[in-house]
Image (cartoon, helix red, strand yellow):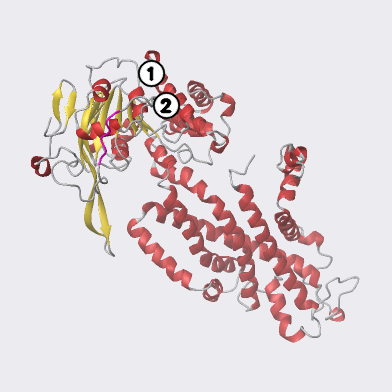
Amino acid sequence: MSDASTSPAQPSSATAAPVLKVNGLKKHFPVKKGLLSRTVGQVYAVDGVSFEIGAGETLGLVGESGCGKSTVGRTVLRLIEPTAGEIEVDGVDIAKLDKKALRDYRRQMQIIFQDPFSSLNPRMSAGDIVGEPLMVHNIAQGKDREDMVAQLFERVGLRAGQLTSLPHQFSGGQRQRIGIARALALNPKLIVGDEPVSALDVSIQAQVINLLMDLQNELGLSYLFIAHDLAVVEHISHRVAVMYLGRIVEYTDKKSLFKNPQHPYTEALLSAVPIPDPEIKREKVILEGDVPSPINPPSGCHFHTRCPYATEQCRVETPLLKEQAPGHWVSCHLR
Amino acid sequence: MAAIDHQKELNRAGANVEGWWQHTVHLARRYPLGAIGAVMVFIFVMAAIFADVVAPHDPLQTSAAHSLNAPDGSMVFGADMMGRDVLSRIIHGARISLAVGIGSMLLGGIIGVVIGLMSGYLLGWFDLITQRIIDIMQALPLLVMALVMAAALGPSLENTIIAISIPLVPQVARVVRSSTLSLREMPFVEAARAGGMSEWRVAVRHVLPNTVAPLIVLGTAQLGSAILTEASLSFLGLGVPEPYPSWGRMLSESAAEYVRTAPWLVIFPGVAISAAVFGTNLMGDALRDILDPRERS
């Protein structure tokens, strides 16, 4: 998977203004109980997350189930309203825009979903699904729209003859291509991929990932790529952010993350990746216990309950994300 | 092990179906009960539309000479005490039954869909209040509520339709609300929002069409019970007034007095009511399977 010809192209303008800049993003879901729906607690799904994505760059976002990575993706698109924080797109904080003003920014950011079955309306034809955003934003009508949809179909590797087919007549991989075509219809700058390949067969995964990377090269797209499969993330990302219980614990370029992980949680994650060679033995870091509940997260460093190196300081004081080496950010007292 | 006749299996699965006629025949083979229901409903509808042509006699023409005539060559289903032809009255009665059935099903359905969709979509106080009102309405049986409404509104065709449609609203609203609650969380609805669609458009284009399958089944079941309720209301004297022939009133006029001496006055309208209700229900069950988009070829 790390063949040079298929590795991600370098971002065209790493130093230019980022496409997306997220600062101190928080999403707390209230826990309600009883007849009067009193709020009895909060789920700290996302608890102060900051990152940037440049033009043509892919940021991989990894973490266990329930660590808040999907919530980050949806909050960035304002499909879920953020509790606090800034989401800057092109220098404009969209977290504070009203619904009407937000509509124009919707065009710049789209999403691809994990489940290729529930992400397409079963009663609309594939062509209508892809063409609907064009109609809603008054981009093209009638014949023009049909032509644009046919072009989008071709671009993602579907035949124009399949325009009138219903979603259930496609395979999982084809359906995911329809989802990608729909996301591309508005010519966005950023696409959030919420585990876009996790539900597919491995051979189809490779096809879809290569399609995403080709599209990035052609169109200069940026991706926020949410996944739990580290091999996939290593293949497609330029930089990677590791999340644990609503916070980013390590954030750096792909190479230094996989070669030189700094945070104990990242170490444990990487040591769990299987090596396809029975001869190689490696010391595995086995984590004890379960992920604590985000309703009542641990004090101090969220990871201290499972960290093999935890000290008294970790239990009391929340570590900040510090730049350990240029571009390599770690949130740990011990590094 | 029995050999598999591939050609036969392919035909059974509808591999070589072309054109609407073959398609209809294929569907009728796959859903024989549904086909029977469809034929019954077809006859019912045709009788209603072409009543003037089909009916052998004038349904309102009285004749002392034919009073309580038993079924014979000229009056196949016999005559009532005023000498009116029972067959002609049943054929004309189909009009009333169909008008009331379809009218109240559609009226109740539209009101129910609007309430259910708003309730499932807006949630909050609107949902809480409408759902409690619906709880109250569901506590009352269909006939009782229709009776109260009909008595309050007075007997006429329009009022009968309204009286029967209102009690049908709660079921529709509940079905639409529950579908809406699950559909609004689906990724394709999120995708529509991410595409910048208005909430109104999301509700009408993405949520509503996906509630249709259960609605059609419910609608045909309700068509049956609306026809039955109309007959009951007319039986009790609160339905469609004279001189329109109504199946329910034909039963009530004759049931007590003539059931022994002239049973055809009771049997034939009764059979007509049963057949109409049974036919719509059979058809509804088959429609549910056929209209599922995953079944469409």
Q: Which chain carries label 2?
A: A
Tell me which segment is drawn in magenta.
A282-287
Q: Mark 1 lies on which chain?
A: A
At mark 1, the secondary structure is: helix
- How packed mark 2 is, by other alpha carbons closer than 10 Å (few <14, some 14-19, many 20 or more), is many
The image quarter containing residue A78 is top left
The image quarter containing residue A239 is top left
User: What percent of the width, then of the height, locates residue A273?
Assistant: 33, 31
User: In front: B160, or A162?
Assistant: A162
User: What percent of the width, then of the height, locates residue A72?
Assistant: 28, 37
User: In front: A198, or B223?
Assistant: A198
User: What percent of the width, then of the height, locates residue A134?
Assistant: 44, 29
- Give the answer, above or below, for where A60 lies relative to A302: above
Q: Residue A184 carries which label?
A: 2
At mark 2, the secondary structure is: helix
**Residue at x-position 56% and y-position 29%:** A163
| Amino acid of disc 1 | Leu
Determine which residue is flagged by label 1: A219
Q: Do the residues labelled 2 and 1 touch (CB within 8 Å)?
A: yes
Judged left or right of residue B144, residue A60 is: left
**Residue at x-position 75% and y-position 68%:** B90
| Amino acid of disc 2 | Leu
Q: Confirm whether circles 2 and 1 share one chain.
A: yes
